[in-house]
Image (spheres, rainbow, N blue to C red):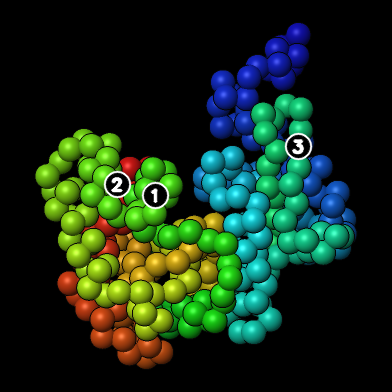
Amino acid sequence: MADFQANSRPFAALDRSGRTRRLRRLAEAALTAYDVPVARLTPLGRGVNTMFRVDGADGHRYVLRVQRPDGPSAAQVRSEMAWLAALGRETDLVVPRPVPARTRDLVTVVADPAVPEPRTCVLCHWVDGRFVDERLSAPQLYAVGEFTARLQLHGARMTGLDRGRVDDLTEFGRSQVDGFSDVVLDRAVATAGGDGRIRAALERARAVRAELGCGADVFGLVHGDLRQDNYLFHRGRVRAIDFDDCGYGHYAYDLAVTLDELEHLPQRNVLREALLDGYRSVRPDAATTDPAVLNAFVGLRRVQLRLR
C-alpha cells in the first residue's frame, strides 16, 4: 500500500529523492535509444538537472542528463550538443562528448506516465578528473584562463546555434526584445527586494555592456557557468563540464563567473591574476580583462544568482 501511495502522489509533491526515483525509470527508457549496454545506473546529486552515471557493460562510463522542464528547449539542448561535438572533433579541449542515439540525433525526448511532461535527455561520455576546490593553485588557474580563451575562440566560429543570452535577467527578461530594458531592470530590482545597491549594480552592468558593444572581439558563444563545480583537472590538464548554461554574451562575463567563485579563498588575488594571465596568453583583449569591466559583470552575476 505504501509503494502504491508513493507512486500515485503528484510529482510536484515529491522531494528530490522521490522525483529522482520517478525520473530513473524515464532515464532507463531514454537509454534504450542508444547502443550502450547498461550495467548500472547511479543517480548523481549535483546540478539543477537530474543526472545519472551510466556504467556500461563494455567498460565505458557515461553520464545521462534528464533536463529540467523549465530549462532550455530540445532545440537549444541540441545546439549545446552540437557545440560539444564540434569541440571534440576540432580541438584538443576536453569536454563531454555527446553520444548519438541510433537515429544519430544527439537529443532524446522521453515521456513517462509518472512524470508530468516529456523530458529532454542527452548522453555523454564521462569526463575523468578531480575538483580541487580550496586547494586551487596559480598554475591551475592559469590553465583555466587559457582553456576559457580557447573555448571562446572556438565558440566564435559556431554560427546559427539556438542559444539565448547568458546575461538575461529573470524569465521575464528572456521574453523581451531588450533583456536589459528599463522595464526588465525595474522588475528584476523589485524581485530581488528593491535594494538600491542591486539597481546600481545592474545599471553599471548595462552601461558596460553598451560601451563594449557586440563585436566579435568582445562578444560570442561562451560556457556561461565556468565555476569551480564545472572545471576539473586530470593529469595536469584542465577539463570543463556542464555546458547547460552556454549561450551568447560578453567574454568578460565568462571570466567574471570564474572570478566570483574565488572570492572566498585567501589566495584569491593571486588566483585572479593567474586566471587573467592565462587568458591573455591566448587572447590579449584589453577590454575583456579590464578590472572595471570584470567587476561590473561580477556584480551582474551576483544579482542573477539572487534572482534564481
What kind of element bears circle 2? helix
Q: Is residue 19 left or right of residue 219?
A: right
Residue 211 circle label:
none
Name of the residue lying farthest toward the left: 196
Considering only order in the chain, which callout, 2 or 1, is on the residue closer to the N terminus?
1
Identify the amino acid type marked 2. Answer: Val
Which x, y percent locates residue 218? 35, 78
Q: Real-space Cα distance between discs 2 and 3?
A: 35 Å
Question: Within the image, what quadrant is residue 264 found in?
Answer: bottom left
- Residue drawn 66% across the image and 60% down it: 78
Which x, y percent locates residue 56? 81, 57
Q: Real-space Cα distance between discs 1 and 2?
A: 8 Å
What kind of element bears circle 1? loop
- Residue drawn 62% across the image and 25% down it: 11
Question: What residue would you read off at disc 3?
Answer: 111
Question: What residue would you read off at disc 1?
Answer: 176
Vertical placement of residue 131 versus 19, above or below:
below
Proximity of marks 1 and 2: CB atoms separated by less than 8 Å: yes
Question: What residue would you read off at disc 2?
Answer: 184
- Residue drawn 23% across the image and 61% down it: 206
